[in-house]
């Protein structure tokens, strides 16, 4: 009886989370979904977190079993495609479970985040185990399985939340993954070991962004618009600081206004609630980051150099101002699915840089809309992993990896790697643009 009640509860968890979102999946809703009493719930679990962790453990085992069978049934060169197909099939068959494990878990506590990362890491380990026995000439994707599995998971949840079929992703994602194929013995980017950071981007501001100083007591001698801007920016920086330091769950309006040094009435004159303020923070961080990145991009002379310079500027700007992107990386899902979609939409704007030069020519084979979305999701996963493991300091050491994620589907894995190696070495890249590439890639 107890075991049957426990199983009903674990089955209900992903369904309740999928319907209401992680933050709103209360114990009351969990027990209602399972058809049991709260007393029975607390006989089984100490609280919501323990219950969700148990549900995630069951989902993990089911997913791992699917991926393991798929990988073992194929030759090693087909292992990535088999794992990809298994991920998509699992999401199609168990959409609520996939949503919890691959997406909504990102709204959870550090223990929930650890469980999500560990589960997807074990999927990646199955691929690494298969690679370990492959001949060095085997063509396999030179991209971290940890990154692409996490990125694909993000993309799956994004598509599901928008009511799009995940099964339709298979063809484009398989072509995208194939664009990274390189002989195993020549792999360079499959780990996430940092390299020495590149020189400082010329357009990087000398100083980090800081909030404006607080207004003096009394009636300010400033226009109402300037006063509102000062209050708004102080509130946004306060949210970023709180969220980056302790996660979205630690953000409350009372704490925001105290840290910002403004009255609660001022907050509500600017924002309807803290979710609206977080949305404004996303826009604020995006606007400033895009300005720096775009300037670096358009100051370079060739397509690949533009992507490189934009990536360097982005990584170094993020390092210089870690609280703003860090709050977004760790807090967007916690603020609800709408905020997560908002952040995803902003991240996809950066992939427009990869389409530079394609007008008037056929697009490169690997550069479909789905590929662009996968690139953005993988870059987001790199930033997330870096934030969780080391903070965003050190992200510029992964510029080569980020550039390869972006450029391989455009140039091909070998040419992208060659150019990035030259750029990392600081060599003149002028002659690199004369090697028989399609017009849209030069």
Image (cartoon, helix red, strand yellow):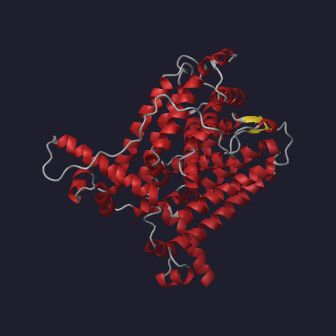
Please, is residue 169 above or below residue 247 in the view?
above
| Residue in view at x 62 percent, y 31 percent | 407
Percent from the top left, x then y, of residue 57? 64, 67
Image quadrant assignment for residue 251: bottom left
Please, is residue 397 above or below residue 154 in the view?
above
Please, is residue 18 above or below residue 278 in the view?
below
| Res. 106 in view | yes
Image quadrant assignment for residue 6: bottom right
How many numbered circles does the render carry?
Answer: 0
| Residue in view at x 44 percent, y 49 percent | 323
Left or right: 250, with 103 as reference point: left
Percent from the top left, x then y, of residue 264? 24, 59
| Res. 335 in view | no
Closer to the camera in the image, 315 or 335: 315
Percent from the top left, x then y, of residue 153? 59, 50
Which quadrant of the rendered structure holds the C terminus?
top right
| Residue in view at x 54 percent, y 18 percent | 301
Closer to the camera in the image, 332 or 15: 332
Closer to the camera in the image, 119 or 426: 426
Percent from the top left, x then y, of residue 209? 39, 42
Closer to the camera in the image, 45 or 33: 45
Left or right: 215, with 385 as reference point: left
Left or right: 27, with 439 as reference point: left
Which quadrant of the rendered structure holds the N terminus?
bottom right
| Residue in view at x 64 percent, y 20 percent | 428
């Amino acid at each position: 009886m107890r075991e049957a009640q426990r199983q009903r509860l674990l089955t209900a968890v992903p369904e309740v989370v999928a319907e209401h979102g992680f933050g709103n999946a209360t114990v009351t809703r969990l027990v209602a979904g399972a058809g049991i009493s709260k007393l029975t719930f607390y006989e089984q679990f100490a609280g919501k977190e323990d219950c969700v962790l148990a549900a995630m453990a069951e989902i993990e085992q089911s997913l791992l079993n699917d991926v393991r069978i798929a990988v073992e049934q194929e030759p090693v060169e087909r292992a990535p495609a088999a794992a990809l197909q298994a991920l998509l099939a699992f999401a199609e068959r168990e959409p609520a479970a996939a949503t919890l494990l691959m997406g909504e878990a990102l709204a959870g506590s550090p223990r929930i985040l650890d469980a999500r990362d560990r589960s997807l890491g074990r999927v990646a380990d199955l691929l690494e185990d298969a690679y370990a026995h492959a001949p060095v000439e085997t063509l396999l994707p030179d991209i971290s399985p940890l990154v692409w599995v996490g990125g694909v998971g993000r993309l799956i949840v994004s598509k599901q939340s928008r009511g799009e079929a995940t099964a339709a992703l298979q063809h484009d994602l398989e072509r995208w993954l194939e664009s990274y194929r390189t002989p195993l013995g020549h792999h360079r980017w499959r780990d996430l070991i940092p390299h020495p950071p590149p020189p400082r981007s010329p357009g990087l501001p000398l100083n980090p962004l800081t909030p404006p100083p607080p207004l003096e007591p009394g009636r300010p001698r400033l226009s109402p618009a300037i006063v509102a801007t000062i209050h708004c920016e102080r509130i946004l920086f306060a949210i970023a600081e709180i969220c980056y330091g302790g996660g979205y769950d630690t953000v409350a309006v009372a704490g925001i206004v105290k840290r910002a040094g403004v009255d609660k009435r001022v907050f509500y004159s600017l924002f309807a609630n803290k979710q609206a303020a977080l949305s404004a923070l996303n826009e604020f961080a995006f606007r400033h980051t895009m300005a720096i990145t775009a300037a670096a991009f358009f100051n370079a002379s060739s397509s690949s150099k533009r992507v490189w310079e934009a990536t360097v500027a982005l990584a170094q700007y993020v390092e210089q101002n870690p609280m703003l992107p860090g709050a977004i990386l760790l807090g967007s899902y916690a603020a609800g699915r709408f905020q997560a979609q908002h952040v995803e939409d902003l991240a996809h704007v950066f992939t427009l840089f990869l389409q530079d030069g394609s007008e008037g020519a056929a697009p490169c084979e690997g550069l479909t809309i789905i590929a662009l979305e996968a690139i953005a999701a993988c870059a987001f996963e790199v930033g997330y992993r870096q934030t969780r493991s080391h903070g965003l300091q050190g992200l510029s050491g992964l510029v080569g990896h980020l550039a390869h994620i972006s450029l391989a589907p455009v140039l091909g894995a070998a040419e992208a790697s060659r150019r990035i190696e030259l750029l990392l070495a600081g060599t003149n890249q002028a002659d690199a643009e004369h090697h028989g590439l399609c017009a849209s890639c030069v």
